Image (tube, grey):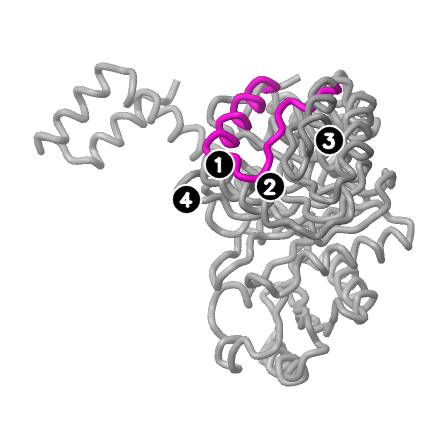
Amino acid sequence: MTRARPSGVAAAIVGGDRRALAKAITAVESGDESADPLLRELFPRTGKVPVVGLAGPLGVGKSSLINLLTAHLRAAGRSVGIVAVDPSSPFSGGSVLGDRIRFERKADDPGVFFRSMASRGAAGGVAASTRDVARLLEAAGFDIILVETVGSGQVDVAIRGVATTRVVILVPHLGDQVQTLKAGLFEIADVFCVNKSDLPGSEVAERDLAELASLGPAPDGWRPRIVRTSTVGPSGIPQLWTAIEAHERYVADAPGHAAEVRRRLEEEIVGRVRDLLSERVAERLATDPKVRQLVDRVVAHELDPRSAADRLLSTERR
Amino acid sequence: MPTKSRRSPLRVLIAKPGLDGHDRGAKVVARALRDAGMEVIYAGLRQTPEEIVRAAVEEDVDLIGLSILSGAHMALFPKVLKLLQKETGTKIPVFAGGIIPDEDARRLRRLGIRAIFGPGASLNEIVHTAERLARGSA
């Protein structure tokens, strides 16, 4: 793809206009049509920087770790864009986004941009648009993108498709060794972070995780690193970053890397097609009399739902 | 600039400028706005005017709510308004709550604080006002 000179809003974002960036994030997360040409223009500038996902259960210290990691990276002269996702209420659709509370920095530091996001109905720990928001931050010139997921349960693994390195954060006393063998969150970790290591039991948690890692490498050959951190003190933050960087270096040279990048983009394209198609079909269900007649026949049990879906799909191909 | 689609929730920043540590009122309002379907960015205690304006810009909010009980509102609120004007050009509406004497409230309204709620204000009224103000800026 050619790297054309960006125009208008895209140029403003690339040029470091923070308001333009903030407005563009709103457009992307609202599914606004103005987001499409913008993402098209900025996409060639993306896919190069580390996108570090931080996942883990509620209250393990994700926000506090992001605060300290950011300070560590700023001290090293790297700029940091942060997306912090909190859940939307399934009842009101509203949310309280509280991840900024833990965040401290100089108010005039242009090397940091912090954006809170509501999950807006998406399961899996991130919002549907989190990946594109991370791209906007990269296009705006941030060296490292940190993504904080919704305090997650066992199967909230959507961060896998967003981040280049996934950190799973745990604390002592979350469970025994067998927990670490279960499917889900533990499978996606490139780095395990045992936070609150000032509390008793962190050695046991570290040992259990080390044993898990020793059972065999991940499919890409990487053995997850384990780091103990504490945000009071604090301790382990440089080690955490070293482990993240080690993984970034590993994947860059790993033989399967290009295929993995391709697989993820394929997944994204398929997801996009699915979203667009179901949106269009839902619209036709609401407005097209012919489609309504089709549904009437399903309601009368003259036609089965699968056949109705086939017909809808065949009339979508234009 | 992009227009907000009808589906997307209103975004509101709730912050406490100044040094008092009483954030119950701010939390009660944050929760009520959440229950009304808004996305509330809760910035928490002891925010400087610079931090508040920066958060408002980065979070692209439709409305800012300031809560204060320290008595420093006449020093801090005008500073927030002035910085906001400087940084955003446009006026993101600002409303406030806390212990604010009537005379100060009148002066703050003239300076541009769009609504001020004291102790005992009805949550319903706060939510309706917040919705009205936030939509006006969308």
Q: Residues within 10 Å of mark 2 (few under 14, many from 20)?
A: many
Of discs 2 and 3, which sits in the foreground? 3
N-terminal label among 1 and 3: 3
Residue at mark 1 to residue at mark 2: CA–CA distance: 25 Å
Labels 1 and 3 in the same subunit: yes
Q: Nearer the viewer, mark 1 or mark 3?
A: 1
Mark 1–mark 3 Cα distance, whole angstroms, equals: 27 Å
Residue B15 visible at all: yes
Q: Which of the 4 quarters of the picture holds residue A213?
A: bottom right
Residue type at mark 3: give it: Val
Any mark on residue B57, and which?
A: 3
- Residue drawn at point x = 82 percent, y = 27 percent: B83
Give the label, 1 or 2, closer to the camera. 1
The residue identified by callout 2 is A117
- In the rendered image, residue A128, in percent from the top left (x then y), is placed at 53, 40
Residue A120 lies, with reference to residue A218, above or below; the image says: above
Q: In which quadrant of the rendered image does the C terminus of chain A lie?
A: top left
* Image location of residue B14, percent across then percent down: 64, 39
Q: Are marks 2 and 3 on the same chain?
A: no
Q: Residue at x 79, y 62 (%)?
A: A241
Q: Secondary structure at mark 3?
A: helix
Secondary structure under tag 1 reads helix
Left or right position of B89 against A149: right
Q: Give the residue pinned by disc 4.
A: A90
Determine contact: label 4, label 2, CB under 8 Å: no
Residue annotated with mark 1: B123
* Residue stretch in magenta: B111-138
Spot occupied by residue A164 in the image (x, y as percentages of width and height): 68, 52
